[in-house]
Image (spheres, rainbow, N blue to C red):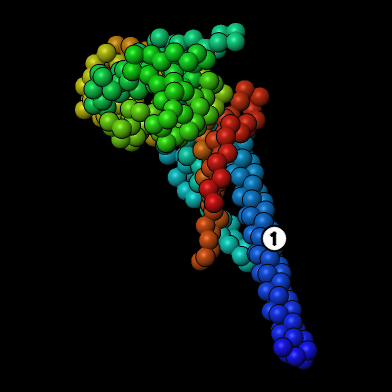
Amino acid sequence: MNKPGVVLISTLFIVIIMSIISSQIGKNFFLSIQRDSYIDYKNYTLQLLMSAEKEAIKSIQKEIISSNKKLTYRDPILNQSYFFSNELATIQVDIVDASNCFNLNSIFIKSGDGIEINKDNQEWLERLLRLEGVNELNIESFIDQLIDWVDLDNQPLNFGAENYFYIGPLSTINQYTAKRLLFDLSEIRNFPIFDQISFTEISKNLCVMPGLQNQLINVNTLNNSHKFLIASFFDDDNLEYIESQILDIPENGYDSVNEFTNKITRSISWPSQVLSINSKTLLISTKIFNESFSNELESLVILDLSNSVKILNRNFIF
């Protein structure tokens, strides 16, 4: 081969290599710009969501704490959406009462470095699930698996499940048991009981309050969906009667728990101290959206004894 031909081939080869390198550099540069743009967009979205959450907390402090008023099902703060807009997106804020549910953490008692079972609250949970139509075997299985998820040992209860079930060779979950109180209701989705029944069948009146083992149910914000929860307090299982009383809340709410329990005129099975005429836990749902995207922040907050709002949990949905 003559020298001009060799030079031409070598030059073409170099050009091809440089083109490939340039193309890759351009591609990486473009991806870098996209990545930086996404990070900027995400940070901006987070700032807007957090600002909206802050405004919602101010509204809670103004409308509920400062005025020291009862929170009832008629209260405007629970029955209207708040909207804020700018040139890029619209923000919607909704505040709902998060009090009226059974807190799964309430069946546990911290004892030194260990965890014991609150038998009274366990019986209350069993009664609630029974009223909802869950059979005895599934109730026992669910509670055993709940206890095994939280307790510190690796010895499964009769119908429970410890680490071997979740990380064993046949498992697709690959997650250790928590060995702590629950942080979010979604933790229970991997329980083996949900191979037998649906998650919604058990979870509709359940909730998780991170770090809280007591839960006050507000009798002034009850609705028909809470009939099983309230019926579980009473010896009489007459759901039709309980439902009629729940829907007959005075316009301005009850002034005392006794006023509510005396109206139902049924013997109460569980301590009335878990009932209240006000709400201590609220859920702030903040959504930012436009034509091309939608993101959401759910903030679970508690109104504490010092008249301030404490955030128990945040859940970002991107």
Front residue of 197/251: it is 197
Across and down, in percent, residue 279 comes to: 50, 29
Q: In which quarter of the image is residue 88?
A: bottom right
- Residue reaching furthest front? 1
Which residue is painted at 52% across and 15% down in the image?
152
- Which residue position holds label 1? 36
As shown in the figure, which amino acid type bears the numbered disc 1?
Answer: Asp
Q: Is residue 287 in view? A: yes
Q: Which residue is drawn at 58% across and 39% down?
A: 314
Q: Which residue occupies the foreground of this view, 302 or 176?
A: 176
Q: Position of residue 270 (x, y in %)?
A: 37, 12
- Secondary structure category for the residue under label 1: helix
Residue 297 locus on image (x, y percent) = 55, 46
* Residue 145 found in image quarter: top left
- Above or below residue 55? Residue 89 is below
At 65% from the left edge and 65% from the top edge, which residue is drawn?
31
